[in-house]
Amino acid sequence: MDNIELRANKTSRAIGERLRGEVQSYQYHEVGSRIFTAKFLLENKSHSITIPDDITWERISSSHYNIGNLIDELFHKIAHKNDFNLDLLSSFSLSEIGDHVLYDCLMIMDQSSLTIEEFQDTKLTGQYFLHLIQRLMESEGKELGTSVTPEGLNRLMIRILNPSNGSLYDGAAGIGGSLIEAYRFNNDISMFGQEINESNVAIAYMNAIVNGIDLSKFQIAKGDTLFSPAFIENDSNLMQFDYIAMNQPFGLKLNNIQMMDYDPYGRFSGRMGKISRMHGDLAFLQHTVASLNETGKAAVIVPVGVLSRSSHAERAFREYIVNNDIIEAIVLLPSKLLSYTTIQTVLLVLNNKKHSSRNQQVLFINAEEQSTSKVRSQHYLTQDNIETIVAMYVQSSTDTEDVKVANLTEIIESEFNLNPNHYFTSHTVETQFGDVIINKAAYDEKVKNKRTLKEIAQLSRGVNLPAKNTIKEGQKGYKVIQLKDVEDGKIDLESIEVIPVNNAERYLVESGDIIIASRGTAYKVAIVPDHNEPLVLSNMFIRIRIKDKAYKPEYIKVFLDSPVGVALIEGMKKGGTVKALTTRDIEDIEFPDIEINEQEGIIQTVKDAEVKYMELLQQANEVLKHGKLNAYTKMGLRNVIEGLD
């Protein structure tokens, strides 16, 4: 299979280079997919598609004229001669592309793709097609997440579902990856999908063809799943399925929200929460629940924020699925699996007929470490990773390091927070020491004397800032500390902007206040230094003002900067694209309670280390500078550059 991937990558690069300047870059995959599918249809001897007698691959590949018309004619005749919905195969015409360009692309496909014998193996042709399309889309600069879910994620969803027979549905089908993976797992399954992008629907059918799928069991409809679901029974009810596998769009903004209030299928208001324009993530989950039959099971990839955000609608949905006991498992997925987002994602497993041993329970699985890196920015799931996750899902019945079995009472007491980070005792955090694992249970057990922040300090958030387009030139205001003003644990007082804000007095900071970033991806903690003019804190920060004189702000900052402090804070963050903290989230964080003289010793230890670090850094800079000066002298450049010391 590795050889198949290498050959597909080579073909995609060569075709992309040949098409550059000839067609729009976003059309590369349209050309490559149709050439490969045409060759498959004309070379594979076992597929069930009726093809015209007068068109052969030899005729197409040996022709120097009307190549595009010949391939277009092939797809038109196939759509006409077959009962399946194949009209979209003709949705992109090759006839407008020059014959010399298409001929070169055909030659590339002949030389770098598969042999005639390999074209008879649909496992090979399916793998080749997937890698070809993925790489062509990458070369186009398109976001893969709009159409291609990583193969490992599709395989994981299907392995979790373990479909035996019946129907499987994907309401965000893309190019049909989840449906095809289900067919590979069990070819008795009937596959249904809906996809809003016409090009993806066409490629999904090509994908099914080159994978040898019986198209009588495969149906993908074009259309908007939320506003116009395609699969309806008795003209009034949503079709319901045995299985659902879906990688839904993230952060989708909903238009025509008024229409959704009157959804004829009752998905978006009432029992599962009333959505707003910002609730695209939630709308797909509501559609999923409504599309499961009474014994149905779903595995869907969702941003973790929808399982923890505090909006009324999202909480109402979580209350519904918790109180109705249809959550079976929530798997915390590794980062960097999806090339188009850094949002933390989970695999949510819903089951209308849970095994009795799992009634009134939710299985939380930490699979963050179950991935392999291809390149620094991209991870993927190997077969071993998938087997490990599936084994935890199937076999786990008690708590382990990577599994937490939470009863519904515990979840209700946690205010229906379904973020797995809330339930795991161990967290992996990125620190100056590298990635380290913090075991909260061990911290709770081994550090005996602890106090909470709310016992010794007053916590409050900063002020909301006005929109920039409402600020008038010369308008008076206050210096406001924003995220950009804090770097490396220090506040840059010189860079702070003056902004007009309301009720500024409530949000003034004092020397010694600790501020901690409440939004964004960067972990920022700083102590407000002495200053001569009023400083206001923006709503991007939480202010911690120590009230108990037995505790030094510098000591609390040392703790918050420690791997344990980072893990506790990061575990509290909620949200999707932008994670957020509230004062309520962090007020119960416990720090080691020690005498003030010991605190002062710890503070001094850190200060001494920082001074030594700066001295060594300066020495290192001098070594580097002198080394480069010597190199410039040897190059004869020293005397022609003024100002060098």
Image (cartoon, grey):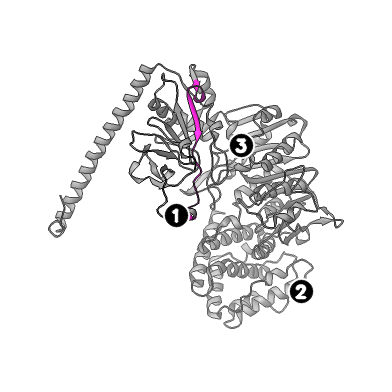
Task: Select label 2 or label 3 by which is in front.
Answer: 3
Which residue occupies 71% across, 79% down? 54
Q: Which residue is mark 1?
A: 472
Which residue occupies 24% across, 35% down? 615
Which residue occupies 75% across, 47% down? 269
Which segment is the magenta one? 451-469
Kind of residue indicated by mark 1: Lys
In depth, the one of 386 and 627 nearer the eye is 627
In depth, the one of 567 and 550 nearer the eye is 550
As for residue 25 lying within the magenta part, the answer is no
Kind of residue indicated by mark 2: His
* Crowdedness near tag 2: few (<14), some (14–19) or many (≥20) residues, C-alpha within 10 Å: some
Residue 298 shown left or right of residue 23 in the figure? right
Q: Which residue is mark 3?
A: 419
As for residue 454 lying within the magenta part, the answer is yes
Measuring from the top left, give residue 184's x and y in whole percent. Answer: 69, 52
Q: Is residue 51 visible?
A: no
Kind of residue indicated by mark 3: Asn
Measuring from the top left, give residue 196's x and y in whole percent. Answer: 68, 61
Measuring from the top left, give residue 219's x and y in whole percent. Answer: 75, 60
